[in-house]
Image (spheres, rainbow, N blue to C red):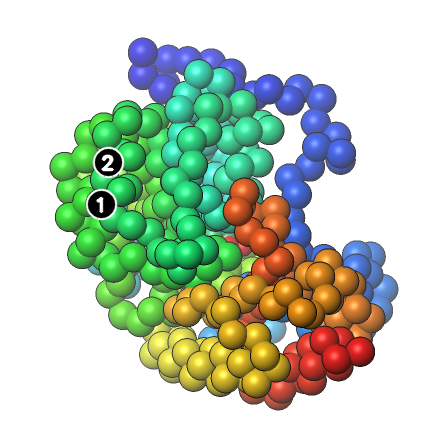
Amino acid sequence: MSSLDKSLYSGFVLNDLNNDFACFHGGAFFEGIGVEFDNLKAKDNIISADVLDAWFSPAPKIDEIINKDLEWIIRTSPPTHAEGLIKTISEIRKVSQDSVLPGSGSSDLIFRIFPYWLNSSSKVLILDPTYGEYTHILKNVIGCKIETFRLFREEGYKVNISKLARKLKNKFDLFVWVNPNSPTGLYVDKEDIKRLLADNQSCKRIWIDETYIEYLGKDKSLERFAEKSSNIYVCKSMSKVYALSGVRAAYLCASPFNIKELRVITPPWPISLPAQISALYALKQESYYFNRYNETNELRKQLVLNLEGLGINEIVPGVANFLMFHVPREFKSVSLIIKECRKHGLYLRDISTMGSCIDNAIRMAVKDSNTNKLMIQILQKVLNS
Ligand SMILES: Cc1ncc(COP(=O)(O)O)c(C=O)c1O
């Protein structure tokens, strides 16, 4: 039976979703600003290093265009299927328009598509640790059988490709691979992934989440590989790499055949007008963003040195805009450090919920140079108090 034949969302296990069941997300910095936005100035006194929003501004052209026609942009319906944005993605990323499905952030794509593909008898493989929202949708919403591919602290949380190849022989309905992974920030090379997955038919579908891939530089994405494959889907958040987290834009890239099936469950106006405009112009400003990625790499290296200066030595050598590190036993517990940092306006992420094996570790976003210095000063104060 094809996915199109089954009744939509038959996989849901939670019919009475209420706030208690809402997807847990460890980002808490809005507590320091106020969710009713009555004093946005408060944002200047907090450091949101618990989420991985870009430290840099969206490309200047976006600001110029949105500000010029803001009133009209806010009250106007966007192109129904994000046609212009899809055309631009196709031109810039060199994939066909038929291979692209738009979404209001990758969260929208994940929550729209997974319940359509999967039900409680589906078997899904995810990394452990990995981005926590995947566990939520698979376990709490759909009720799938989840298997994990453990990444070990003793092995520096690296993905062991030959072990993974053996694991994948166990036939899965879906394998979710976040690359670079979160919270580790580690990356498996594109060519290794291609070799592993080229003829893999033991997984019905493979979902590669490339939320942070652009930080590695040009041409690291598997979008074009996915377009030619029968079972690979590459999920492209535009939040963290184009500084667009607030407007919500993303797209999925897969073969035209596979994308066609998913158009049926895609609503009209899947992306707001401010987001379509921002995403389209972001894609056209590649060189602006590449300069920011290079700067991010330098800022991250400096942050590593500064953390080492505090006596934090077990830092995972991530490649994106964040770092994961273990807090040495002689320091306070992670929960206490996080609590005390918040009193100084610094929000860090306790990542114990992101895997079964994470012990006393923190994930911290890379910020601009001054903010990084401030974060280190606050951490130093908290660790020494
Ligand atoms: C690995 C990963 N995937 C997906 C998302 C969701 O991103 P968005 O919905 O903003 O595209 C995030 C956000 O933090 C993430 O870290």
> Where 8 sits versus 331, above or below?
above
Q: Which residue is mark 1?
A: 162
Judged from this view, the residue extending furthest toward the front is 330
Q: Nearer the viewer, residue 52 or 322?
A: 322
Q: Residue 214: which numbered mark, if any?
A: none
Residue 68's x, y, as percent?
A: 58, 74
- Asked if disc 1 and disc 2 are in contact, CB closer than 8 Å, the reply is yes
**Residue 317 found in image quarter:** bottom left
Residue 133's x, y, as percent?
A: 55, 42
Task: Report whether 340 appears left or right of 79.
Answer: right
Task: Report whether 135 appears left or right of 259.
Answer: right
Q: Nearer the viewer, residue 58 or 97?
A: 58
Query: What amino acid is at disc 1?
Result: Ser
Mark 2, Cα crowd under 10 Å, few <14 / some 14-19 / many 20+, is: few
> Where 85 sits versus 314, above or below?
above
Which residue is pictured at 46% across the width and 59% down the height?
Answer: 184
Which residue is pictured at 60% across the width and 19% down the height?
Answer: 13
Report the label total: 2
Residue 127's x, y, as percent?
A: 42, 43
> Where 34 sits versus 261, above or below?
below
Q: Does the numbered disc 2 mark a residue whose Cβ is under 8 Å from ligand 1?
A: no
**Residue 306 found in image quarter:** bottom right
Q: Secondary structure at mark 2?
A: helix
Q: Secondary structure at mark 1?
A: helix
User: Quarter of the image containing the C terminus?
Assistant: bottom right
**Is residue 257 something that shows in the picture?**
no
Mark 1, Cα crowd under 10 Å, few <14 / some 14-19 / many 20+, is: few
Q: CA distance from mark 1 to mark 2?
A: 6 Å
Residue 115's x, y, as percent?
A: 49, 26
Q: Which residue is mark 2?
A: 166
Q: Nearer the viewer, residue 359 or 74?
A: 359
User: Quarter of the image containing the N terminus?
Assistant: top left
